[in-house]
Image (spheres, grey):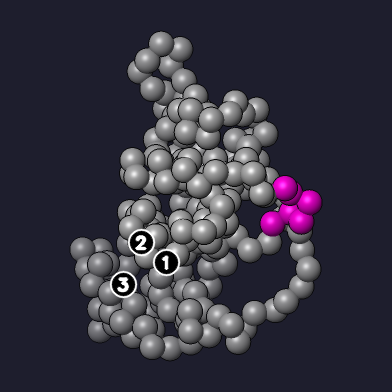
């Protein structure tokens, strides 16, 4: 009975929460704390073929609409996202090469960057500073956040596609780097005024191959 109660508590918390819940927070609310992994797996299996699925992103859990229903539940509306070309490139480089410094990002992109891209990505909550690199000047290191994982439905940064997977999907054959990054991050609503034509594929291939 205690096991059943624990599972029901976890289920109720996840349903009531409007954002992903830390596994440790769920653990604190149940009696048999050592069984947290088994309980979550049980719930995950139970909901695997239902309209909602239990998903883990980073160290957090949440219920999400089943992927095979996503098209039926899409509500279309026009909305511009002010995510610049430079910010998208920066996000993809950080995702694949983290932890990474700003000078290293500039070296991969081949251009100097202002604070705009980093600041914007921080405001969205997709990247954060992660200490400093032990080299002269001690520049800040940057990594992606749990919010990045949650937004794109990625369980772990290890689940990002590698270069071979991107090539198998055709992303690196005849598309610009920005198109590849757009597919990679599933961002479909770009600023229509951005000029996305003059980006070379080689830059993206270089930092993916170094992953």
Secondary structure mainly formed by the magenta segment: loop
Magenta region: 190-195
Is 186 drawn above or below residue 42 in the view shown?
above
Q: Position of residue 13 (x, y in %)?
A: 46, 71
Task: Say which quadrant the N terminus sits in.
Answer: bottom left
> Quadrant location of residue 89?
top right
Q: Tell me the distance, in whole angstroms, between the alpha carbons under discs 2 and 3.
A: 30 Å
- Element type at marker 3? helix
Q: What residue does disc 1 label?
A: 169
User: Dot 3 corresponds to which residue?
Assistant: 40
Structural crowding at the residue carrying mark 1, measured as other residues with C-alpha within 10 Å and reported as few (<14), some (14–19) or many (≥20): few
Q: Are marks 2 and 1 in contact (CB under 8 Å)?
A: yes
* SS at badge 2: helix
Residue sitting at the far top: 136
In this rendering, would 203 be left or right of 6? right
At horizontal 55% and vertical 43% (from top left) the residue drawn is: 200
Residue 165 image label: 2
Disc 2 and disc 1: Cα gap in Å?
6 Å
At horizontal 28% and vertical 79% (from top left) the residue drawn is 42
Q: What is the quadrant of the C terminus in the image?
A: top left
- The reply to whether dot 3 and dot 1 touch (C-beta < 8 Å) is no
């Amino acid at each position: 009975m205690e096991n059943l109660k624990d599972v029901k508590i976890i289920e109720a918390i996840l349903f009531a929460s409007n954002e992903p819940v830390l596994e440790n927070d769920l653990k604190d609310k149940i009696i048999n704390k050592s069984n947290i992994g088994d309980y979550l797996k049980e719930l995950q299996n139970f909901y695997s073929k239902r309209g909602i699925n239990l998903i883990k992103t980073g160290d957090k859990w949440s219920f999400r609409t089943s992927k095979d229903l996503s098209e039926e539940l899409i509500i279309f509306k026009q909305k511009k996202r002010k995510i610049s070309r430079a910010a998208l490139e920066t996000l993809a480089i950080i995702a694949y090469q983290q932890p990474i410094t700003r000078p290293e990002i500039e070296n991969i992109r081949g251009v100097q960057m202002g604070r705009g891209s980093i600041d914007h990505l921080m405001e969205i909550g997709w990247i954060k500073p992660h200490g400093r690199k032990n080299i002269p000047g001690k520049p800040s290191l940057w990594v992606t956040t749990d919010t990045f994982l949650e937004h794109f439905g990625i369980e772990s940064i290890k689940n990002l596609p590698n270069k071979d997977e991107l090539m198998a999907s055709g992303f690196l054959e005849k598309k610009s780097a920005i198109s590849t990054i757009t597919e990679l991050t599933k961002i479909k609503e770009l600023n229509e005024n951005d000029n996305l034509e003059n980006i070379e594929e080689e830059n993206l291939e270089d930092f993916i191959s170094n992953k």
